[in-house]
Amino acid sequence: NSHFLHIAEKTLEKNNGIIRTFLPPVQPTLQQLINLRETNENEVRTIINNLKSKNSSGLDEISSKILKFCPEELALPLVDIFNKSFRSGKFPSALKLSKVYPKYKNGSYLDPSNYRPISLVSTFSKLCERIVLRRLLDH
């Protein structure tokens, strides 16, 4: 549907001047970025256990409910992935993808503008984001 294909472009066009005023383009080097402290199995397990149990999932179809069934088995591989990401300063491309679907707001069900896009990101992405948030709040 063309409404959802172009909504992001329209929003950017409307707000481009404001965005450029408050957020001028910056091209930092890796050395200028915050050096993130590595994570460990205990931290990853704790974050998994603190996730809300939901059936919703991103493109990988892995929900937080599934993750909460096997934190012991997943903690070490996730620690490895997240720490490699922190060391390289790059977020894995696969974790940037999300599932987008239209959520009805109000009005006519036939009018596409009465829906808003909802993005469901990977649960693994949420875990990594929470670890980074902890680092930023501690910084």
Image (tube, rainbow, N blue to C red):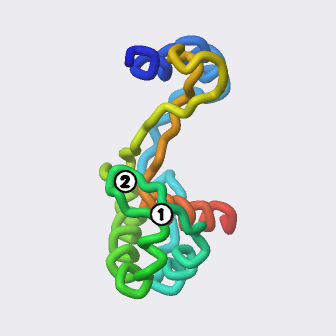
Say which quadrant the N terminus sits in: top left
Q: Which residue is mark 1?
A: 128
Closer to the camera, 123 or 69? 69
SS state under label 1: helix
Residue at (51%, 72%) from the top-left corner?
37
Q: Are marks 1 and 2 in contact (CB under 8 Å)?
A: yes
Where in the figure is residue 139, as x and y percent of width and height? 66, 64
| Spatial separation of the CA atoms under disc 1 and disc 2 | 9 Å
> Height in image: 2 above or below 133?
above
User: Looking at the picture, which amino acid does disc 1 mark?
Assistant: Cys
SS state under label 2: helix
Earlier in the chain: of badge 1 and badge 2, it is: 2
Residue at (53%, 62%) from the top-left corner?
54
Q: Which residue is mark 2?
A: 95
Residue 90, located in which quarter of the rendered image? bottom left
Where in the figure is residue 6, as x and y percent of width and height? 43, 16
> Height in image: 74 above or below 34?
below
